[in-house]
Image: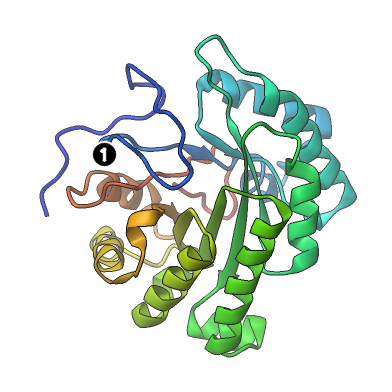
Amino acid sequence: MSPKSRICCSLSHPRRQHYLPNKILDDSYVRVLDTTLRDGDQAPGAAMSRRQKLDVAWQLAKLGVDIMEVGFPASSKEDLETVKLIAKEVGNAVDDSGYVPVISACARCIRSDIDAAWEALKYAKLSRVIVFISTSEIHMKYKLRKTAEEVLKLAKDSISYARSLGFEDIEFGCEDAGRSNKEFLYCIYGEAIKAGATTITFADTVGYNFPSEVGQFITDMKANIVGIEHAVISVHCHNDLGLAIANTISISQMGDVNWVWFRPVWVWVRTGSG
């Protein structure tokens, strides 16, 4: 595994990449997804009003982020309406170069969550739903109280349902992937892609992994997930051990990983993420 000679993103690339949900054409390009308005909004004291969130979204668009995750519509009527406002305004503001940010929001593998996300995001020119579920043994047993087979079915059914509503850009995230069984990850990611996921996300939810571990996870995923050539791999690293940025940068530089992007968050939940 040799490091890339260079990596670049929307702020440093001479020409913005044409956005394809399931592919990045330049293997040196790293997509930026900013989750300040969703993950960051969970930080103590960081709650923002609807107008403040809209103002932040406009600033993120000025920065040129590829994707902004702006809320969790199923969590409250207020959040749904805020996501809808951002989708209508920022999500339709095309600049002179043709750039418009992808507006995204998260949803659990629950139909009502996905319905709320669609109701909020359908107004944006480019929208993405981030469907997630826990996959570590401890989370499945004690948090979800479900078997691995039940979790797998929920994931497949939820992605298929999102597509049936009209979502063409679907991210599937495995919460606590860093502590999950690798064989189960290969299986659930492969089934997610088959069901219509365009991006799959490895989440080190509890900030548990070291750069070498995350790097090996991504290498193994590339080698073992059926259909991986039809999806983008993303990473979401938390900072509980102070390694979020190290994990993110090391993965971005890996020579055999073409489709990795990261999520900066400037207002931190717990200890932050990279």
Q: Nearer the viewer, residue 84 or 23?
A: 23
Residue that appears at 73% across and 69% down = 110
Q: 149 above or below 124?
A: below
233 or 254, which lies in front?
233
| Residue 40 position by quadrant | top right
Look at the image and tell me whether residue 56 can be seen: no
Label 1 element class: loop
Q: Is residue 67 above or below residue 106?
A: above
Where residue 203 sits in the image (x, y, percent)?
Answer: 46, 61
Residue 240 visible in rendering: yes
Callout 1, which amino acid?
Answer: Asp
Asked if residue 55 lies left or right of residue 190, the reply is right
Q: Pinpoint residue 197: horizontal percent, then vertical percent.
A: 52, 58
On-image quarter of the N terminus: bottom left
Q: Residue at x 76, y 61 (%)?
A: 113
**Can you say whether 73 is above or below 7 in the image?**
below
Name the residue carrying label 1.
27
Q: Residue furthest top?
A: 96
Q: Image check: 253 left or right of 121?
A: left
Instruction: Please give the name of the residue rendered at 58% of the width and 43% of the height, measured from the top-left corner.
Output: 35
| Circle count | 1
Residue 24 lies, in percent from the top left, at: 36, 40
Other residues around mark 1 within 10 Å, as few (<14) / some (14–19) / many (≥20): some
